[in-house]
Amino acid sequence: MEEQDAAAALSGEGHDAWVMPEDGNVWLPLAEFSSVFAPRSAWGAARIWILSLCFGVGIGTGVGLYLSFAWSLLFAVLGALLAAVFAVTLRYFVTVTAERTRFRLRVRAQQAQLGRNTQRELAARHEPVHARLREGEQLVAEEKEREEAQERAKREDEQRRVARQSEEERSARDRERQGRDRERIERQKEREALRSRTRQELSSIIARHIQTLSTKRKQLVAPDEYGKMILDGWQREVERFRERVVKDEISAGSRPVLEAMLREAPSMLSDTIERALKDWPGPPQVAGISFRPDMTWEEYERFVERIVRSAGWRSTRTPRGGDQGVDLVVERDAVRIAIQCKRYKDSVPNSAVQEVAAGAKHYDCGHAFVVSNAPFTPAARQLANTNNVDLLHHDELIGRLQAKRQTLGSPHRWPLE
């Protein structure tokens, strides 16, 4: 459109327009300016000469201000002629250039029109192709959308599958954890049952030996000079009871359980024994007879004699001057027993065993007892074992007398003879 306007302007249609061509041709404005001098009519030619005459008169007048009138007239004529020649030459040069510019613009406008027409023809000719291309593009877009939808569906299916798998794995882990918890609970119940059975067996073993344990504790636990209880001997006795009695009498299935319990709580055995001793009512007691730590040896002999008589045995004291190591001779149902009473603060030595063993033969007794409130030395126990002498605490005396009466016949002679 701009090229058509420029062509129209150069062809003389609308001289008021001032158009700069697209390619920046500077001669187009000059051609428009030169249209003022175009001799297209008589008035046009006259206009050129009038302007030339005015120019020459102006030059002559200017010169005449300084020179004579003749010179002024001469310069006016020469100026007019030079102005006319210059105007004609400029008009020719600008006109030729403008014509060339108009020609190029017309050619360019025609080429542009031809290009537009060609584009319209090509567009009309290729419209079906473009339509098919658009249809193809639409199909490709639809196919792409379907593929994206399928891909989204696959991703969603995969996410659901992963979620289900995760849920199944979590459920499996929960079931496995619950199974482990049940197994742990069952094992704990079984362990508790084994421990309960082991504690029952241990309590039964302690109950069978409760009187001996009570006697040992009385013999081995005593206050020191500061009033504090000495427990070293009793702790050794508890350990000996564990090694020699508990391990031997407890069942094979409970033995490792007991060992584990003792490793966890080393004081468990001694605590169990202490509770059993606390709950045990004690050995059979005789009314009005009780032991006092401050008894003299004579009071202790009378104390033992009263225990023997309360059990239904006859008791005879030996002479004080020559008792031959025997303090009491007791008998019942043809069973004679020699008893030596030892009121000691420390352990009873083996000399007491030697004395009562010899004195039993002297008094024609089939059995010999050493009764004391204190423990016995290992040497005394060894000698008592080889000489068939019973070493007793006074709390064990009634029970041992009853056992002798039930298990022994009526031998009057010393068994080693």
Image (spheres, rainbow, N blue to C red):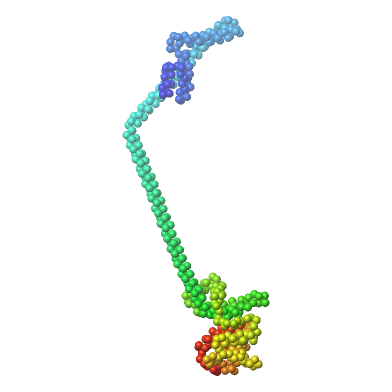
Q: Decide which of 41, 276 is in the foreground and name it.
A: 276
Location of the C terminus by quadrant is bottom right
Q: Is residue 5 above or below residue 270?
A: above
Q: Is residue 174 above or below residue 352?
A: above
Q: Position of residue 40 (x, y in %)?
A: 43, 12
Q: Residue at x 64, y 77 (%)?
A: 223
Q: Is residue 368 above or below residue 16?
A: below
**Looking at the image, which residue sits at the far right?**
225
Q: Position of residue 280 (x, y in %)?
A: 54, 77
Q: Position of residue 144 (x, y in %)?
A: 37, 43
Q: Quadrant of residue 395 in the image?
A: bottom right
For the question of whether residue 114 can be seen, the reply is yes
Location of the N terminus by quadrant is top left
For the question of whether residue 382 can be seen, the reply is no
Q: Is residue 41 above or below residue 255?
A: above
Q: Position of residue 17 (x, y in %)?
A: 46, 18
Q: Decide which of 160, 248 is in the foreground and name it.
A: 248
Q: Residue at x 53, y 86 (%)?
A: 402
Q: Residue at x 50, y 73 (%)?
A: 199
Q: Residue at x 33, y 33 (%)?
A: 127
